[in-house]
Image (tube, grey):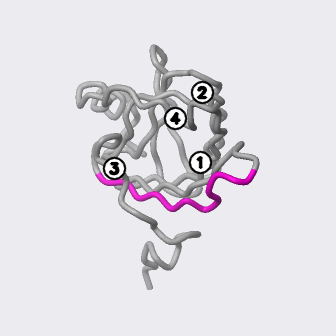
Amino acid sequence: MKSTENETAIFPKGEKASADYFIGTAWVNILVPKDETECYSIGDVVFEPGCRNNWHTHPAGQILLVTDGKGYYQEKGKPARLLAKGDVVKIPSDLEHWHGATRDNSLTHIAISNITKDGPVTWLQPVTDEEYNKVNDDQPNNL
C-alpha cells in the first residue's frame, strides 16, 4: 500500500506561505515561535514541486534541516546545491540565497532562524523562471 504525504510527514503542513515571498505553493508550520529571549524561531516548510522562495538574506544566519524530498539551495553567484533528505545547510549572516523544490519533487525542511532587531529575514527579488529553469536543467536526469 502506497503511503500518503499525511502518513509520512513528521509535522502537519501548516499555513499557506505568502505569495509575496514564494513562487508556487509552500506551507509553513511554526514549530517554535520566537522564544522569550527573542533569539530564534523554528518552522517546518513544505515546498510543492516547482516552488521556491525569493532571494533573501538572514541578518543572523539560518540552518536548514532537510527532512524529505529533493530541492535546491543556491547562493548568489554560485552553482546551486542539490538537497535531499538528511542534508544540512548552514547559511551565514547576510548571504543572499534562495531554496526550494525541484521541478518534479516536493521539498520539506526545518528552518532554524536566528532573530535580530531587524527580524529573521530580509526578502529580496523573486528567483526568475530563467534562473530556476537553468538550475533544474543543469541537474542530472536521475533525480
Badges 1 and 3: C-beta atoms under 8 Å apart?
no
Q: Residues under labels 4 and 2: Cα distance? A: 6 Å
Q: Position of residue 143 (x, y in %)?
A: 42, 45
SS for callout 2 = loop
Residue to which mark 1 is pinned: 111
- Residue 1 or 33: which is nearer the viewer? 33
Badges 4 and 2: C-beta atoms under 8 Å apart?
yes
Badges 1 and 2: C-beta atoms under 8 Å apart?
no
Could you tell whether 106 is left or right of 103 in the image?
right
Q: Residues within 10 Å of mark 2 (few under 14, many from 20)?
A: many
Residue to which mark 2 is pinned: 59
Q: From this view, report whether residue 124 is shown above or below residue 47.
A: above
SS for callout 4 = loop
Q: Please identify, in this view, whether the residue under mark 4 or under mark 1 is nearer the observer.
A: 4
The amino acid beneath tag 4 is Val
Q: Please identify, in this view, whether the residue under mark 1 or under mark 3 is nearer the observer.
A: 3
Residue to which mark 4 is pinned: 121
Residue to which mark 3 is pinned: 18
Q: Residue at x 62, y 57 (%)?
A: 33
